[in-house]
Amino acid sequence: MAEERIFSARKYYENDSADWMILVHGFGGSARTWKKQIGFFSEHYNLLVLEMHKLQSNNRLDLDEICRLIKNTLDHYGIEKAHILSFSFSSLICLRFAILYPEKVKSLVMGGGILKFNLKTKVLLYLAITFKKTANYMILYKFFAYIIMPRKKHERSRSIFVDEAKKLGHDEFCRWMDVIPQTLNSLNWLDEMDDKISVLYISGSEDYLFLTDTQKYSKRIKNSLVEVIDDCGHVCSIECHDKFNNIVFNYLESNKV
């Protein structure tokens, strides 16, 4: 029997009694984007930090296959159930994961969470998908990074994600771009969510593209909460990492099962 494929991952082990937390980076990101979270949460939880863009395959990426690979990775490390901490686009991947494999999920924490793409974002995505084969992918990525993180004080977050995206390469960028349209019916998944899974969305007050829809549609998830960090942009896990970490920690501690 062929060995099941898994994602590359780095493990930070605390002890047998500690819960597991799986960190799933956003599109173009890497484990490096979780630096402030690894330092904090590794003192309280066992961590598994995924490197989603190091999958050795040239095949088209399928959303449900990505979820299956996440499950394979958890099984490979003997993790029965975990808190899933995601960021930005990966929040949609992890939402789908919770629909397909609810038995693996203790809770979902969505940093800079996305529940749907509004009309403006859909137009931008259409342009990116249309020109992805011919345009320099870093020009497209920098453009999107600026649209999502437009202010001067967002510059550090933009820089970190742009630097990590440079390591992707054009072909890998195109493969992940093809996943995005597969999430456009995400609102249809909400009725399938297991009510036992608690869901926390954390957004910055300056998350202009996604916050309004997150606040609106998260109400359709029975066991959900939205926390907004004032004076903070989309990448709240970096820009306001202390506040972000404390919100996550306090939420998980108050919802222990």
Image: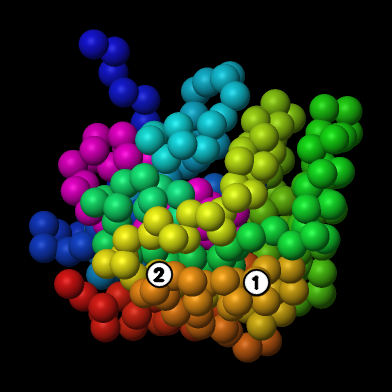
**Residue under the point 38% across and 59% down:** 193
Nearer to me, 112 or 32: 112
Q: Quadrant location of residue 166? A: top right
- Residue 67 lies, with reference to residue 220, above or below; the image says above
Relative to 125, 29 lies left or right:
left
- Residue 206 lies, with reference to residue 63, above or below; the image says below
- Mark 2 is surrounded, within 10 Å at the Cα level, by few (under 14), some (14 to 19) or many (20 or more) other residues, namely many
Q: Quadrant location of residue 197? A: bottom left
Q: Quadrant location of residue 62? A: top right
Q: Which mark is residue 197?
A: none
The image position of residue 116, as x and y in percent, is 64, 60
**Residue under the point 41% across and 81% down:** 246
Q: Is residue 34 visible?
A: no
**Residue under the point 60% across and 76% down:** 216
Q: Amino acid at mark 1?
A: Asp
**Residue under the point 51% across and 82% down:** 227
Number of numbered discs present? 2
Q: In what element is the residue under mark 2?
A: strand
Q: Which residue is mark 2?
A: 199
Q: Which mark is residue 213?
A: 1
Q: In what element is the residue under mark 1?
A: helix
Relative to 228, 71 lies left or right:
left
Q: Which residues are magenta?
A: 70-94
Q: Can you say which quadrant of the picture contains the C terminus?
A: bottom left
